[in-house]
Each structure stands twice: as C-alpha cells, then as structure tokens.
Image: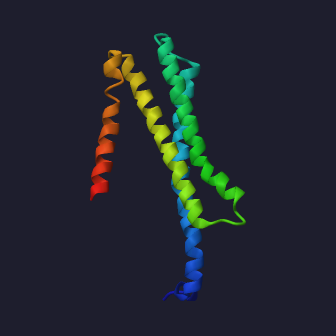
Amino acid sequence: MSSGSDDDPVMRASTERYDRVGVSFRWPQILASASSIFFGFLLNIAVNPPSYFTFFDNVILLAALYAVTVATTMFIMAVIYHARHYRRLDVERFLSRTKQYALIGIICVMLAMYLGLGLALNSKLPVQIAYSLPSLPFIFILFRSIRHIRE
C-alpha cells in the first residue's frame, strides 16, 4: 500500500525536482574523490621524482598535476554553485551547469591520465612510442561515443 504523498501529483512534482538535484551531486562527488587520490599520487611523484626524470618529464608531470587540480575543482563547482544559489535555485540551470563542470573535469582527468601513462611508458620506451600508446584507450572511447551517438 502506498502512502498518500506518492499519489499526490503536487507532492510528487515538487520533490522530484530536488531528487534530480541530489542525484546530480552523487557522481561529481565520486569523480572528485577519485581525482583527489590521483592528485595525491602525482604530487608524491612530483615531490620525490625518480632520478632518471629529465626536465621534459618534470614539465609533463606538472601539466598532469595542474590538469587533475582543475578537474577536482570542476567536480567541486557543483557544490559551490548550489551553495551560492540555494535560495533561488533553478533546477534546470543547476543541472546544466553541473553537467558543464563535470565535462570539463572529465576532460582534464583524461588529459592527466594520458600524460601519466606517457610518463610511465617513457621510462621503458622511446618518446614517440611512449606518448603514442596512451592515446589508444582514448581513441577507443571516442569511437564508442561516436557509435553510441549514431544509435
């Protein structure tokens, strides 16, 4: 047996908007946590670089560190935006902004992952191969996305 509020279209419509806001907070929280852990690993490498790192490797490492920093910030921006506009929250605009922040964050994490993989392979392979191989997973994602859009 359902409660009275489940049958009431006014109650269902008014809470549905805020359920969508709550759901939109969950995945940026997970992404922010994961990118923060990734940031910690990169920061540890930057503070204690291997002896074989060249100037080029250090520049790549710093670029990856900055990309993860921007990504983490973008994932947190949904919370900041919600806090700033809580009293007059437009749910549709909030969801749109959250999606924009998350997309920027995901692109930055992908860049940092590419650079991190390139650094890891650079110690074992020539530079051209080391920075070509990490692009394969991202090319696969691109083709899957294009295929998904066409369906």
Q: How is the image coloured?
A: rainbow
The answer to which of 31 and 132 lies nearer the viewer is 132
The vertical placement of 95 against 76, above or below, is below
Task: Answer whether residue 30 is visible to the viewer in this image.
Answer: no
| Residue drawn at the location 57% of the way across and 89% of the way down | 4
Residue drawn 48% across and 11% down?
54
Where's residue 76, x and y in %? 61, 48
Q: How many marks?
A: 0
Q: Residue at x 36, y 22 (%)?
A: 121
Image position of 79 with respect to 131: above or below: below
Q: Position of residue 28 (x, y in %)?
A: 54, 51
Nearest the camera: 33 or 91? 91
Q: Which quarter of the rendering shows the C terminus? A: bottom left
* In the image: residue 23, left or right of residue 138: right
Q: Residue at x 39, y 16 (%)?
A: 123
Vertical relation: 127 (above or below) 149: above
Asked if one can make out residue 109 in the rendered structure from this viewpoint, the answer is: yes
- Residue 99 locus on image (x, y percent): 51, 54
Closer to the camera in the image, 76 or 143: 143
In the rendering, at what x and y percent does residue 79 appear? 64, 53
Q: Is residue 12 above or below residue 69?
A: below
